[in-house]
Amino acid sequence: MNDYKLEEDPVTKERTFKRFAPRKGDKIYQEFKKFHFYSDAYRPLKFACETIMEEYEDEIFSLIAHEAHYLADKLCREKSDLCEASANHSEL
């Protein structure tokens, strides 16, 4: 969760979590992992994730029990309706 930060669009005031940390395959990853970041800024994301997990716990276990392919997509789009159809969930 420390790889994300909460941003607010200055025009729409919509708040979203954006990833700022590089992924393992990125060139800068080796340099980036030398640093340790800790902040209370990740707490809203942690709370949001915990809330989603609690609210959709039965659906999550059902998908896991049925060995669903594309678990993140099915949960995000079909079960919870929290994501847009065009959203990419490769980082989940």
Image: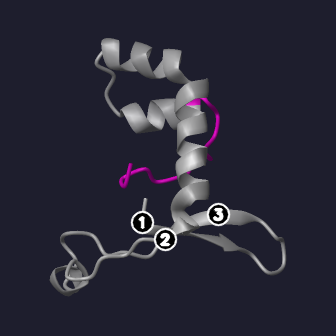
Query: Residue at position x 63%, y 40% from top?
Result: 82
Name the image quarter holding residue 29: bottom left
Whether 38 is drawn above or below 64: the answer is below
Hey, what amino acid is under mark 1? Asn
Query: Residue at position x 22%, y 77% from top?
Result: 33
Mark 3 falls on what kind of element?
Answer: strand
Viewed as shown, does residue 40 lie left or right of 69? right
**Who comes first in sequence, dot 2 or dot 1?**
1
**Who comes first in sequence, dot 3 or dot 1?**
1
Which residue carries the number 2 mark?
Answer: 39
**Residue closest to the eye, 41 or 82:** 41
Which residue carries the number 3 mark?
Answer: 16
Viewed as shown, does residue 57 lie left or right of 71? right
Q: Are marks 2 and 1 in contact (CB under 8 Å)?
A: yes
- Badge nearest the viewer, 3 or 1: 1
- Label 3 vs label 2: CA separation? 17 Å
- Label 2 vs label 1: CA separation? 8 Å
Position of residue 2 measured from the top left corner of the image (x, y, whole percent): 42, 66
- Badge nearest the viewer, 2 or 1: 2
Q: Mark 2, residues whose alpha carbon is within 10 Å: few (<14), some, or many (≥20)?
A: few
Which residue carries the number 1 mark?
Answer: 2
Q: Are marks 3 and 1 in contact (CB under 8 Å)?
A: no
Q: Mark 3, residues whose alpha carbon is within 10 Å: few (<14), some, or many (≥20)?
A: few
Q: Are marks 3 and 2 in contact (CB under 8 Å)?
A: no
- Badge nearest the viewer, 3 or 2: 2
Hey, what amino acid is under mark 3? Thr
Name the image quarter holding residue 69: top left
**Residue closest to the eye, 17 or 63:** 17
